[in-house]
Amino acid sequence: MNSVHNAAQAVLEVTGLSVGFAQRGTVLRAVDDISLHIAPGEVLGLVGESGSGKSMTAYSLLGLVEPPGQVSADTFRLCGKEMRAADERAWRQLRGRRIAMIFQDPMMTLNPVLRIDTQMVEAIHAHRRVGRGAALEMAAAALQRVGIADAPARLHAYPHQLSGGMRQRVAIAIALLNAPDLIVADEPTTALDVTIQAQILAEMQALCQASGTALLWITHDLAVVAALADRVCVMYAGRIVEQGPVDQVLAQPAHPYTRGLLDSTPAAAPSQHADNAGATRRLSTIPGLPPALGERPEGCAFRPRCARASAACLQVPALVAVSPGHEVRCFHPLARVSA
Amino acid sequence: MPFFILRRCLQAVNVLVVMSLLVFAGVYAIGSPLDLLVDPQATTEDLARAAAALGLDQPVWVQYGRFLSRALGGDLGDSFIHGSPAIGLILARLPATLELAVVAMLIAVGLGVPLGLWAGLHPDTVGGRTIMAGSIVGFSLPTFWVGLMLIMVFSVQLGWLPAGGRGPTTELFGLPLSVLSVEGWRHLILPATNLALFKLALIIRLTRSGTREALQQDYVRFARAKGLSTGRVVGVHVLKNILIPVVTVVGMEFGSLVAFSVVTESIFAWPGMGKLLLDSITQLDRPVVLAYLLLIVLLYIVINLVVDLVYALLDPRVGRGGSGR
């Protein structure tokens, strides 16, 4: 990786990360040889369709992949700790303390039979020895920080008494409780109303900036990435196909898949790119469907859906730089458009 | 909540009336208890006198009407055979059956929940599979056969435990109980185990499938992502969710344990209600059969009510919506 950041400072430094599932003699790789690098306070967007391995990547970063899934990596450093051979105990010390996670569906992430205070206090007590009273105060303060009014009363509520947006705020408050270095957010706004979505995005951004928390924001929505992220990684069929600074990747995508994603996203295409902003832009779609885990084609997995594919694409292309910090995994990258 | 309880009580009265009608008609259809009660050499006058004494000379609807009016006053009639109040006969046997059922249920829950939990957490291990195989055996083997085998092994061959009877009892608040003495336990443990086996298998399977399901849920993953210990995740997050179905089933099954421990009580000569029911049916002792079944219906109704209330306590989404915990 030709990253400009110093590896010792990074909150997350993984290379060659794979998550495999053994099946009938072969190993199916949900995540195939990906490398991620997140600097302190940085917001990295991870974009891909359903089934591209985004969520599995997120779980592997917290050591939450369960058997039969197998995680392997060449480098795996989290907050300066070597995690390749880490046992459950070592993971537990980091989870919730240095690295936290927010899930997609707030209806499912909070335990329905436990009150909010129980679920918050236990997250504090998992890492710190404080009295129950002090922990409750910390919990109430955390709820206030994510914009929940009347926090002490909300602490006594059960999850079903809160709205979806409110529940996701609670989940975010729990993630922020122990001031982690990195939050992995797995499509946390997808299940919410658009207005709530925008609010939560803005709040997350402000909170992470204020506390210097780095963010790995997983989404299928390029518009969200454009608004939030510093850098973006585009994932397809378990591999990263393009990565770079978010402005560059969105303005000048080099991978045909990224281009396709942009064209099929309403209003996500950067406006400086459009000649006549007033005219309605025709949405196009990428032909075909993303391959299922067991049916990924040899070589470049995007090949069957790609207009530019050639015989060369039967090999897996390497990630090559098209400009500093902007890398693409394609034999036929799109030419740079002069601005 | 008061409205809910009131509605339940009205339903209960309906069920009791229908039940009594069915039993009355059923026992009437089987035959006349007079043939069994009166000496075969008795004269027609004797028969008529006996029938009049028991009220059996009246048409069946008149008999039912009499029963109903007396039942409203709390009198379920006297046993044809024993001549004493039917309800008294049953209540005298109730503590023995209740004790047996409670101990059996405690065995089933006390072993079933931990074993099911373990099997759910380690589904692909030798231990997990052994537990599941064992639960299938517990389901499949007939109770009477297992009872006989228990007696064969522990009483006849090893000679460790008595083969039957209740043994000495100790009074507590006027109830004769076995659980207060070692000798009592020696008599109790075999029938209780026998009775528990089926429920144990049921609870193991229920707990295991509940655990497997809960482990797939996002809230378990989120709990782990918070850095909680496995003990806390399983002991609080998983257990509290799977207890909801377990409580329901335990409630229903407890009713059936009390009502139908007949087989076990017969095999181990346990002086409980089941034995009394069996005798009463063969002797067409209608008042006792009626009183017994009405009592069982009442028991079921009460248990269901308790289960619903406990359910509301365990699951904040039900009932009063979260004021209780």
Image (cartoon, coloured by chain):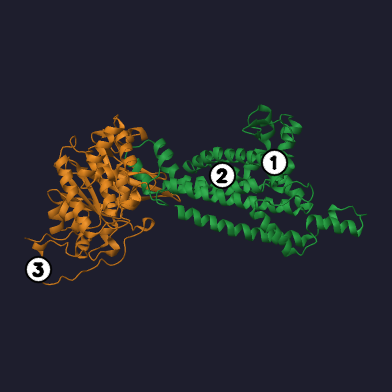
Chain colours: A orange, B green
Q: CA distance from mark 1 to mark 3?
A: 91 Å
For label 1, the crowd category at 10 Å Cα-Cα, with few meaning under 14, some 14 to 19 and many 20 or more, is some
Disc ID at residue B92: 1
Q: Which amino acid, by three-letter code, is at mark 3?
A: Ala
Protein chain holding label 3: A
Give the labeled residue for mark 3. Answer: A277
Where's residue A214, x and y in %?
19, 42
Dot in front, 1 or 3: 1
Protein chain holding label 1: B
Where's residue B51, x and y in %?
82, 57
For label 2, the crowd category at 10 Å Cα-Cα, with few meaning under 14, some 14 to 19 and many 20 or more, is many
Where's residue B80, x and y in %?
78, 51
Secondary structure, mark 1, is helix
In depth, the one of B38 and B159 nearer the eye is B38
Query: Is residue A194 toward the left or the right of residue A67 in the image?
Result: left
Q: Is residue B183 above or below residue A207?
A: above
Inspect this view and state whether residue A247 appears: yes
| Screen quadrant of the C terminus of chain B | top left
In depth, the one of B117 and B311 nearer the eye is B311
Give the labeled residue for mark 2. Answer: B132
Q: Are marks 1 and 3 on the same chain?
A: no
For label 3, the crowd category at 10 Å Cα-Cα, with few meaning under 14, some 14 to 19 and many 20 or more, is few
